[in-house]
Image (tube, helix red, strand yellow):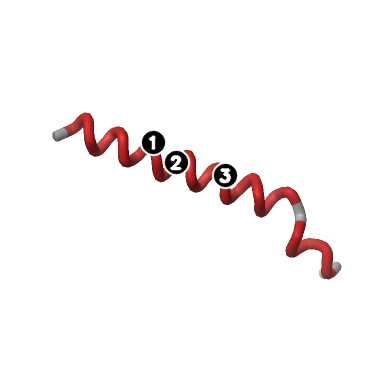
Amino acid sequence: MPSYVGHAPFWHLAAEYNHYLARFIDDVERMRV
């Protein structure tokens, strides 16, 4: 596996997606109460 894989844009995109997903779940939980 090449060393540049650790800095691939995919990991940045995955982090952005996880952040958005966490905020979405938080909003859903807030609406449910």
Marks 2 and 1: in contact by CB < 8 Å?
A: yes
Amino acid identity at mark 3: Glu
Q: Quadrant of the C terminus?
A: top left
Q: Which residue is mark 1?
A: 24
The image shows residue 32 at horizontal and vertical percentages of 18, 32
SS at mark 3 in the image = helix
The three-letter amino acid code for the residue at tag 1 is Phe
Identify the residue shown where x is 78% and y is 62%: 5
Image vertical order of residue 7 relative to residue 28, above or below: below
Q: Around disc 2, counting alpha carbons within 10 Å, would you say few (fewer than 14), some (14 to 19), or many (20 or more)?
A: few
Q: Is residue 15 above or below residue 3?
A: above
Residue drawn at (54%, 42%) of the image: 17
* Residue 7 x/y as whole percent: 75, 59
Write down the residue under mark 2. Answer: 21
Query: Residue 27, percent across and down?
Result: 31, 34
> Which corner quadrant of the image does residue 26 belong to?
top left
The CA distance from mark 3 to mark 2 is: 9 Å
15 relative position to 28: left or right? right
Mark 1 to mark 2 CA distance (whole Å): 5 Å
Q: In which quadrant will I find the N terminus?
A: bottom right
Q: Which mark is residue 16?
A: 3
Q: In x, y percent, where is residue 6?
A: 74, 64
Which residue is rendered at x = 57% and y = 44% of the image? 16
Q: Indicate the secondary structure of the residue bearing disc 1.
A: helix
For image coordinates 64% across by 45% down, the residue present is: 13
Tell me which amino acid carries mark 2.
Leu
Residue 32 located left or right of residue 7: left
Element carrying mark 2: helix
Numbered circle sitting on residue 6: none
Q: Earlier in the sequence, mark 1 or mark 3?
A: 3
- Do residues under tags 3 and 2 come within 8 Å of each other at their CB atoms? no
